[in-house]
Image: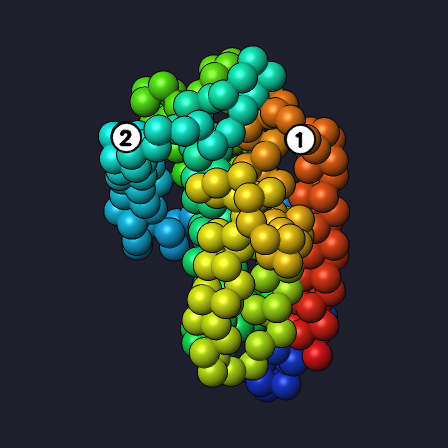
Amino acid sequence: MTEPDRLTEPDRMNEPAHTTTPGAVAEPMVAAAFAGALRPRRFGAWYIAEHQLRQMRSYGWTVVMSGIGSPLIYMLGIGLGLAAFLDVPVASGPDGPVDYLWFVAPALLATAAVSVTTEEFTYTVMAGFKWRRLFWGMNASPVSPEQICSGLVIAVTLRMVFVSAAYYLVMVLFGAVGDVVLGTLMVPVGVLAGLAFGLPLLAFSAGIEEDRGQFAMVQRFVFTPLFLFSGTFYPLDTLPVGLQWVGWISPIWHASEAGRLLSYGPGPGSWPLGAHLAVLALLAVVGWFVARRVFVGRLRS
């Protein structure tokens, strides 16, 4: 007979119950929590990017139609419409005057990429911080504020790649590219232009507590003037000197000129390709650091 069987009934009543101490239960749970947090801490930005891309599926047709429909309409309107009324060439390359459609197409591609950021880095950011408070929920997980900012930028960059590539494909189909092979670099240049304009805008949007029409003002008084006065439809040097500075600070102008250099080469008075890319990179890097700083400051406040 074993020892417990010899216990009398009073002994069993007085025997302490077998319980697990809180520490013994908590330690495996804590270990499991730390183990489960390793991947989000390491790849948190990609988790956020995946979430943002899945969220874009709710307006996927808008993304597709704006990426494919817009270039089709612009190319038809300019290639078959506006260009037919121009008797005098407005731009020249290294071999002389170039087709008007060649001149306009790189600017339209850059503008398409920039317009993506005016959508995704404004109201989406306000929804994340205030309207839906998704960023606060993400911040309660092992994902860091820096990764939340990075994930959003990755998702928007992928959308810009899709839009720019679709635009370039339509340009090729319409014969709007001089050098088709070298012209493929217009896709990353367009994305860089989107980041040069969008990342400072992201920093601005992340610092807004209430939407009192700021985004509408950005659209009307920042994006639209940059689009119109960045040499999109005519060379920048045909503008009055007092307006040419708008192009010099505009990511759209620098990306448009870089695209034209890649498409048909340098014209008279063109800036070097490296100068345009350096301006775009500088704007993107400064905007990136400021945006991350604003995200961290707001989510850790």
Which of marks 2 and 1 precedes in the sequence? 2
Can you give x and y, in whole percent of width and height, for residue 277 in the image?
A: 69, 36
The residue lying toward the viewer, choosing from 131 and 105, is 105
**From the viewer's perspective, is residue 175 above or below residue 136?**
above
- Badge number at residue 84: 2
Residue extending farthest front:
88
Q: Quadrant of residue 242 in the image? A: bottom right
Query: For the residue labelled by badge 1, is the local secondary structure a helix, a strand or a loop?
Result: loop
Q: Distance between the residues labelled 1 and 2?
A: 26 Å
**From the viewer's perspective, is residue 129 above or below residue 192?**
below
Q: Residue at left 46%, top 64%?
A: 219
The residue lying toward the viewer, choosing from 161 and 89, is 89
Q: Do the residues labelled 1 and 2 touch (CB within 8 Å)?
A: no
Quarter of the image where the N terminus is located: bottom right
**Residue highlighted by disc 1:** 270
Q: Quadrant of residue 83 in the image? A: top left
Q: Which of marks 1 and 2 is in front?
A: 2
Q: Residue at left 50%, top 15%?
A: 179
Label 2 CA crowd tier, 10 Å (few <14, some 14–19, many 20+): few
Can you give x and y, in whole percent of width and height, for residue 124 in the image?
A: 46, 63
**From the viewer's perspective, is residue 92 above or below residue 290?**
above
Can you give x and y, in whole percent of width and height, for residue 58 in the image?
A: 30, 54
Q: Quadrant of residue 43 in the image? A: top right
Amino acid on which the number 1 mark rests in the picture: Ser
The residue lying toward the viewer, choosing from 244 and 151, is 244
Can you give x and y, in whole percent of width and height, for residue 237 in the image?
A: 60, 42
Q: Residue at left 69%, top 68%?
A: 294
Label 1 CA crowd tier, 10 Å (few <14, some 14–19, many 20+): few
**From the viewer's perspective, is residue 14 above or below residue 288?**
below
Amino acid on which the number 2 mark rests in the picture: Ala
Mark yes or no: residue 297 visible.
yes
Mark yes or no: residue 127 visible.
no
